[in-house]
Structures are given as C-alpha cells and as structure tokens.
Image: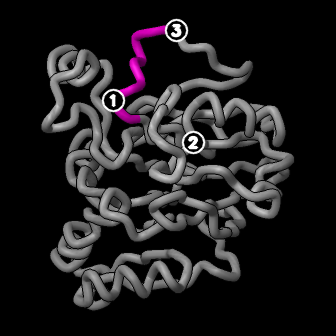
Amino acid sequence: MDTLTFLGTGDAMGVPRVYCDCEICSEARMSGMNRRLRSSALVCDGQDMFVIDCGPDWRKMMELIEMREVQSMLITHAHFDHIAGLPEWADACRWLGRKGNLYAPREVLEQIGRQYPWLSGHINMMEADTGITLCGWDITCWKVNHGKNGYSYAYRFEKNGYAWVYNSDSIHLSEEEKKPLHGLDLLVLGTSFVHETAEFSTRSVYDMKEAAELLAEVKPKRAIYTHMSHDVDTRKKLDLPVGTELAAFGMVVKIKR
C-alpha cells in the first residue's frame, strides 16, 4: 500500500513561533492542536520509503514516529526550513556506516554543497533534473516561483495511473509552471496564511484565498494544504474548496488507485 504521511506542516518559523504570544501560538504551547513542525513528508510503498525535505525538526520527527533510519531524501530547495536537518541525517548515516541518498536538482545540490561541504562524505548527492524513480514512483521536478524568496522546486509523482504533486513553497505560478498541476489525483500545496495582507512583493507562498483560485483552475481531485503559519487555526472551520483539507502531523493519505 502506497502512503503519504505528513511529518511536518508548518512554515519556516513553525508553530508556535518563539517570539509570538498570539492566540494560536499560545494554544499551540498548551493543548498543541496548532503545534506544527517544519514541512516534511514520508512516502512509503510498504517496503521502501523516502522523505521529502529535511528541516531543523528532522530529529524530533524521527523520534515521534519511532523511526531510526532514512535511506533516501528528496529536497525541494535549499532554504533553512527544508535542509537544516541534513547535517544530523549525515551524522546518523556516518554512525550507521551506510551512505544516504539525497536527491535534488543540480543547482540545489550545489547550494547544499556550498553550505555543508562535508555532507558528501556520508551522503550520495544525486541529481534529479532529468527524472528519478523512488518506491516505484516516476518523479519529475520543475522550478516554481517562490516570490521574494526566489524559487523552489515542485515534484510530480506518477505510478500505476495515479498522479500527485508536492509543491510546498510557491506563489503566483506562471501558466508554464501550472502545466504539471493538471490531471492530478492529489495536490499537496503550501498555503502559509488564510489571507495574507502583506504587500505582494514581500510575499513568498500562496494564501488560501489564492490557492482556491489555483485549484479552480487546475482541478485536482483532492487537495491538501501544508506549510501553514501561525495565522491558521486548525480548531476553526475554514471555508475550503470541496475536496480540500488541512494537513496535520501523522496524517496518512493513501496514494493509490
């Protein structure tokens, strides 16, 4: 059985934010319903598995799901909240005596190599630009607009007639960037705010109002929002498009026809 498990669903700062005493951050510190680790996901086919992104909460995620080893990682881009756990993973690989496999587009690998030049001693750096296969999924990637933060990469997965996309960090996609989003059984999309009021040039991720417009255009059969900031209160009923829901830690989704 192929499954997608959400290990983290928060934005770059996570929830609660260290400096913040807003209602949502305060609730996250107490009951924890809104507590969110940095965005990451686990894909498993029942035998093999791989993780998407490796932020600063990687070790905590591993402890929470009681997993001791990861062989393969797929990285969307080289921002802190998506790669800061790589040194810990590399150190774990060193102690286990088994090199891990890190997959990402070449320019992302180059950025990671400049930031952590010693990683390649314990991790195989594998280019994903021309497509790769993990757990039987045929995986392609393409660059997407990340607003003021530059760019990220989205991944499309296809297997046995099922197609889904993981796109955690993007905004205002061009028509060309939207093309791989058509014909999907599932779209995992980053939506940091319910409605973000900051000046557009300062923004980097869709809000839920804009995401609804995107969904109406590309029409996935199902959508799940992730990469949520402390603006999103999961205790409240939000006005989401039909077939759309919010990701939560430990949420397991069957990705199979």
Q: Estimate the spatial distance between the alpha carbons at disc 1 and disc 2, rounded to whole Å.
A: 15 Å
**Sooner in the amino-acid sequence: mark 2 or mark 3:** 2
Q: Position of residue 86 (x, y in %)?
A: 28, 69
Instruction: Please determine whether, in this image, residue 177 is positioned above or below residue 187.
Output: below
Q: Is residue 246 visible?
A: yes
Query: Magenta stretch?
Result: 229-237
Mark 3 and mark 2 in contact (Cβ < 8 Å)? no
Task: Give the CA separation, mark 2 to mark 3.
Answer: 19 Å
Q: Residue 252, percent across and down?
A: 51, 33
Magenta: predominant secondary structure element? loop
Quadrant assignment, res 217: top right
- Can you tell which of label 2 and label 3 is closer to the viewer? 2
Residue lying at 23% horizontally and 89% vertically, measured from the top left: 118
- Mark positioned earlier in the residue sequence (1 or 2): 2
Instruction: Check disc 3 and report the residue beneath it.
Output: 237
Location of mark 2 (residue): 206
The answer to whether 168 appears left or right of 25 in the picture is right
Lateral position of residue 171 relative to residue 91, left or right: right
Which comes before the other along the chain, label 1 or label 3?
1
Residue 14 numbered mark, or none: none
- Report the residue at 35% width, 60% height from top: 54
Residue 230 circle label: 1
The image quadrant where one finds the N terminus is top right
Q: Is residue 1 visible?
A: no
The local crowd at label 3, few if under 14, some if 14 to 19, many if 20 or more residues have their Cα within 10 Å, is: few
- Say which element carries label 2: loop
